Image (cartoon, rainbow, N blue to C red):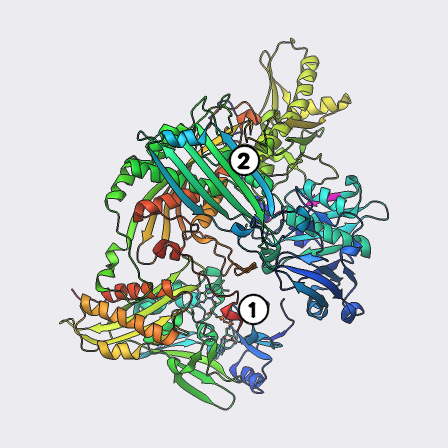
Amino acid sequence: MMPRFEIIFPDNLSDALSVLSSGHEHMQIIAGGTDVITGLGQGSNRFKNTKMLIDINNIPEVNGIEIGREKISIGGAVTFSDILQSEFIERSFPLLWKSVSTIGSVQIRNRATIAGNFVNNAPCADTVPVLLVYNATIVIESMSSKREISLYEFLSGPYKTKLSRNEIVTRINIPIPNKNLNGDFYKLGRRRAVAISRITLAVLADVNSESKINEIRIASGAVTPIGTRFFDLEKIAKGKKADDQFFKDMAGKLGEKIIEVTGLRWSSEYKLPVVQQVFYQLLKGIERG
Amino acid sequence: MNKGFSVVGKSVIREDGIDKVTGKAKFADDYKFDGMLHAVMLRINEAHARINSVDFLEIENNRNVFSIISSADIPGAKKVGMIKNDQPIFCDEKVVTPGDVIAMLVGESEDGLRPLLSKIKIDYSPLPVLNDPKKSLDKDAVLIHPEAGSNLIIHHPLRKGDIQKGFDESDEILEQTYTTQLIEHAYIEPEAVIAIPQGISQGVKIIGSIQNPFSCRRIVAAVLNLPLAKVRVQQAHLGGSFGGKDDTMAILAARAAVAALKTGRPVKIRYSREESILESYKRHPYILDYKAGYMKNGKIKAIKIELLADGGAYTSMSPFVTWRSVVQATGPYEIENVHTDVRAVYTNNPYTGAMRGFGSPQPIFAQESLMDEIALRLGMTPDEIRRINGYKVGSVTATGQTLKDHDVNLITVLSTACENTDFAKKWKNNLKKKSVALELSKDSPILKDDQFIRPDDNIKKGIGLALSFRGCSLGAEGMDASAAYISIQNDGSVYLDCGLAENGQGLRTTYTIIASEVLGVSPDKIIYLELDTGITPDSGPTVASRGTIMGGGAVKNAAETVRDKLTALVKEEFKLPADDIISFTDNHVHSESEGTLASFQDVCKIASSQGMNLSAIGWYKGPNVHWDEETGQGDAYFTYVYGCQVAEVSVNISTGEVYIDKITAVHDPGTVINRLGAEGQVFGGVTQGAGYGIFEEVTTDKGFIRELNFDTYTIPTSKDISEIIPIFVEGKESYGPWGAKSLGEPTLELTAAAISNAVCNALGKRLFNLPLNLEEVLLNIKLRPADTKRGSLV
Ligand SMILES: Cc1cc2nc3c(=O)[nH]c(=O)nc-3n(C[C@H](O)[C@H](O)[C@H](O)COP(=O)(O)OP(=O)(O)OC[C@H]3O[C@@H](n4cnc5c(N)ncnc54)[C@H](O)[C@@H]3O)c2cc1C
């Protein structure tokens, strides 16, 4: 049942922040509403005390995609469709573009936002692993403060983040990656559209002409409680030769790591072998030669 | 294609199409009435429990409660059913499945009522829960309906020839078990119905998302203890049904009607998706044991079949669904010795009933898998084994019926499908390239080096086919007749209506085409009326792919009745010889001797000025069929259709994903009336069949459904299937309008089996359990979450 609520549409950031400043748990920011509204409809605990929705779509400070020399800055209310329309993102952040293109359907992408995706922080949030390998940071503002932290730090648990009730994510900043970083995003769902991810993986690697791994960044979603980086694996890989045997070893290690953080679940019998397989195949994509 | 038609066989855009795509069409929930009340359902979280008492004290005087409706308010039948009256309108004594409704709160707003449900005190005693249909008939099994004496809903035996002798004489024997899953109709529009009281003595009017207005009326009238004529059921535009808006809607209509008569106000019930999936009936899951004896030359000598269908908590349509299974379980193959037993049993699972296909997709999956396996063992191609055993003219079916008097086009559809897909060549090629299935070990979840698959080796191609015959219309299930009403106005425009209800498949357009062809008036001059049981004669339900053959027959009869009158009139009016041939085309009336005589409009004007009745009720009655319950022998259906589908798939051997590259669907529906409508049936049926094959499954945990919405109940999207190619082989037929027969269900029933055979062709391993989802394809298992909780609810 859809509960009754009030909805307001502030048209500047300070108005929105001042409404939020009381930090009441009956207030809830809404961007695309694709998690909030469905959550309200299902009586989800996260939203059950909601009495007022604060729609942030009309706030200029949280809109627009700004392309700088060293980073790109995406507004906290920018939709997935906006991102898909950016040729710069398609070129410079191909993994982000690809993950966004797999989300829901056209209708969902027209409303849903990238900030909503990681603030909701479902285990299967598709852009999270990608933003993690791109080392995204986020700008968080309240009436009294403004801070910028890494997304990795921001995400604290399934459906949990370090966002306070009086804060808004205003910008997502992503450093433009060095040209040698290549990689791919992988998503497995039960069907090809409007699918909840069963497995997501993102890999970015800088492999030199002697096939040595200068740097590698690895992140997953859906197979771990939340989207996460695998810093241990990344460290092991550094300086190693990017060859078939090494990829197999890495895939096995990822499997072990997932067992370590997730434990064995009802789905493990399927997901574990498959995540190793597709991770191996993803790594094959960075192989030189 | 039949020559000489002016509209029949062409592509005609459906008459309700524009309204639907522009949002103007009125669905049941769009109807609102002054003073209308809403109702919400009271349930408990139990699959099986005795209700000791229900205490409404705390909410009785709540201002949001206008009335509390329970079994005590029912003036007539408290239990109903399409076949057997075992389903209570309100379960005041016992719940036997989680969807059961104990009572209903009625008030001005759903929102005001819902929070009150948890304040009602229900004292109940849980009973042992039976979920495994295999245990239903055990001696110590808990009885779901003790008054029935057993959990057996129905047993259909079939005996032909001498099964033991058949096996003894066979060169080889193959025994396999297959299973098919519980699935949801997944109509996009959830249930909605409004009951409107009609004054003191006029009974009640029902408007709703109702598949079969006449079945609905029968049940509402029984519950209200009113004569049929005092219950008027009007069908709103239907947002999908697929067999699913029958029992459920009749029961919801009855609940609304009881409340409407008690309160004296219109009462609406509408379901959320969750409530819809929770309470509505589904497709029967089957366990299918097949044992076949066959000769080295491919001839099948004997087949023993045992089917067990989980009927869930109520009888619903189980006896008829499983009856179709017993008739068709051998598939379209002539087999001397057949021994079949089909049983449906009660459990505390969600109940199962009619769904497009109606007892055929399950045995087709088994029988077509088995045929392919026999072919493989004998070194034959799938089409070879089917050519050897498939029905030809004069073949005798498992029920002892000789196939004659229509084109027995089984081998023709098979050949057409094979030629169009280069079947045998592709099948053999894929077989050569088949991969050894990955052996995954549960104990060491980390892959070994030789288990990794290179990205280029992921995709294996497969091709597979499935073949079926299908009895048209109801067969020996019951009386088979339908009616249509036509009324020609004096300007030549036409009102048309038929007692068979539009279910979203485009029936109204089909009927319009038929009337247009007979009268020679263009389809846009024909206005199709809404179905209202108060106006249109009872024509039985829109089920069993009988819409075109039966309703179409009635429309043609109605149109011909008035056309014959007009023929007589023009002969007299234009003083034409008695043997002159009059034709009606292009909105004009012509004679063989004189050419064009007058416009249709002018002829109607003359008729009207002479006081001629230009309206008629058309009637079409199916020929008699007969059936022996004991032996399962008889002429089960008066005619049959034949179909063959070829699936071409890509299987990802790393993930178990199946992608459908192409389905070639060859069907003999008899004469095609609306080409566009027929193609639509194929596109929709194949897509639904593909969902059944690879995605869809309602899973339960102690009777409780996990997939209560479309986030986890995954039906195919347009991105999941590539090409669908419909091909029609229009066989000759003496029944139906110009020999038009059935298409709706044949299009769905074959797809899962064809896909499964294709996946086997790709992988080199056979899968026995639908759906062929990721886990099944990769690991031959079904994995389920431990409970029914949704992760996102935290
Ligand atoms: C049919 C359907 C399909 C979907 N498919 C996918 C899919 O394929 N992949 C996927 O990852 N997700 C999917 N989703 C989930 C959802 O669309 C995404 O998580 C989306 O990114 C949420 O964005 P939103 O703008 O709609 O968030 P909202 O629902 O508006 O908000 C989500 C949460 O974020 C908070 N929030 C939003 N913006 C801000 C901000 N700027 N600052 C602070 N807090 C904020 C809200 O308060 C709320 O807690 C799907 C959802 C539906 C309904």
Taking the view exactly as shown, the residue that stands out farthest to the front is B139
Picture residue at 62% right of the left edge, 57% below the top: B99
Residue A121 counted in the magenta span: no
| Distance from the alpha carbon under mark 1 to that under mark 2 | 52 Å
Mark 1, other Cα within 10 Å: few <14 / some 14–19 / many ≥20: some
B632, B677: nearer the viewer? B632
Picture residue at 39% right of the left edge, 45% below the top: B755
Q: Left of B104 or right of it: where is B397?
A: left
Q: Is residue B508 above or below residue A99?
A: above
B136, B316: nearer the viewer? B136
Q: Is residue B397 above or below residue B141?
A: above
Q: Is residue B461 above or below residue A226?
A: above
Secondary structure of residue under mark 1: helix
- Please provide percent x and percent y for residue B222: 76, 44
Quickly name the residue at label 2.
Answer: B157
Q: Is residue B258 above or below residue A258?
A: above
Q: Left of B693 or right of it: where is B61?
A: right
Kind of residue at badge 2: Pro
Ligand 1 has an atom within 8 Å of the beta carbon of the residue at disc 1 = yes
Taking the view exactly as shown, the residue that stands out farthest to the bottom is A144
Quickly name the residue at label 1.
Answer: A37
**In the rendered structure, which segment of residues is drawn in magenta?**
B232-241
Mark number displayed over residue B329 = none
